[in-house]
Amino acid sequence: MARSQPHDTLARTIRLHRAVRASGALLTTALLATMLTGCGDEKRSTATSATASPSTSASPSTSPTPPPPDRDGDGVPDSSDSYPDDPKNTPQQPSVSLECDTGNDWSALLTVHPGKDGRPDFSEVWAAKPTSCDAQAEIYPVTDTEKAALKTSKYDGGDITTLYEMCAAVDPEDTYLEAGFAASSEQIPEINAALLLCPSYRYAKKWRETVKRGQVDADLAAQGRIFGEGTFRVGKEIKPGTYVTTDVDGCYWERQNSSGDTIDNYFTNGARRVQVTIRSSDYAFSSQNCGEWRPAR
């Protein structure tokens, strides 16, 4: 068996050392590369985390506050709008309280609410069918319709309380509703004024008929063809003609000349009908307890 030479042993030793050094260099290089890679990954991870995490200091978004309610769209909030359903804000009469006799309740408290076109709304009151009503306080005109009603009524005062009470009551036995009843010259403007406030009143048609008959009488009275008791100048204050009166008690009349002497006269304790003809030659006509004289038909 051949034995190795000394110089061969030395050569192998040198090659082994070189291999070990090369291996160590490679190992060192690999370790450094691994460390550098880890550092890069950590930096990228940190950067990614910083980018992905939202800022905790950012405030959440808020919705805009809605405007306050304004039903009529007039720019005034309902909470401070006196007339929230009227864009023109037309003045209205506040609700009116009435104490009424409804038959079942002698003191029913009913309310008249503001209505359209300045006219009060009596629907709640009419539903209870009161025969009479009294206002709890005086009522003064606020709306243009109420002011027109006051002017039409020819009242001396400034309140329209009576007109409200007239419109509220729906008594079928009211005098104004009697067949053939003619409103007097004072009643005509009052009824017309009430009709301005409550044109849809249940008995409005009968009211108008009463006014129509009354207006005919008012015209006749203005002509001197309807008159009551007293002494009147013929041709100046009353017209000559034939006149009648009905249902009298203790009626006395006389025709007079210019000296005041009696031309003709008549007396009755009671009669269903009394008639007289006043001539154009008579100076005056006088009557007592005879009621109203009207042209004979």
Image (spheres, grey):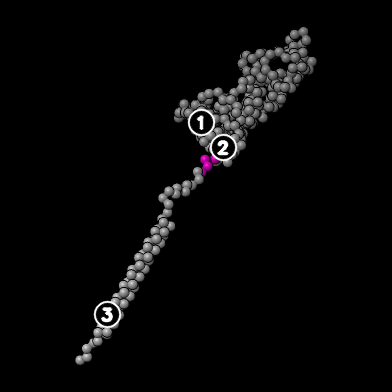
Q: Residue beneath label 1, please?
A: 111
Which label was assigned to residue 257?
A: none
Q: Residue beneath label 2, please?
A: 76
Q: Which residues are magenta?
A: 66-70
Which label was assigned to residue 13?
A: 3
Can residue 264 be found in the magenta stretch?
no
Task: Locate the N terminus and report the quarter of the image it occupies.
Answer: bottom left
Instruction: Name, please, the residue furthest toward the left.
Output: 1
Q: Are marks 1 and 2 in contact (CB under 8 Å)?
A: no
Gap between marks 1 and 2 measured at Cα: 27 Å
Q: Give neighbour class at mark 3: few <14, some 14-19, many 20+ (Cα, 10 Å).
A: few
Front tag of 1 and 2:
2
Q: Is residue 31 visible?
A: yes
Residue at 31 percent across and 77 percent down: it is 18
Image quadrant of residue 214? top right
Describe residue 180's horizontal placement relative to residue 295 as left or right: left
Task: Locate the C terminus and report the quarter of the image it occupies.
Answer: top right
Describe residue 40's horizontal placement relative to residue 181 as left or right: left
Residue at 56 percent across and 37 percent down: it is 76
Q: Nearer the viewer, residue 18 or 36?
A: 18
Residue 213: percent from the left, percent from the top? 66, 28
| Upstream in sequence: badge 3 or badge 2 | 3
Q: Give neighbour class at mark 1: few <14, some 14-19, many 20+ (Cα, 10 Å).
A: some
Q: Nearer the viewer, residue 127 or 38?
A: 38
Gap between marks 1 and 3 measured at Cα: 127 Å
Label 1: state its secondary structure.
strand
Q: Amino acid at mark 1?
A: Thr
Residue 222: percent from the left, percent from the top? 72, 22
Residue at 39 percent across and 59 percent down: it is 46
| Upstream in sequence: badge 1 or badge 3 | 3
Q: Nearer the viewer, residue 174 or 129?
A: 129
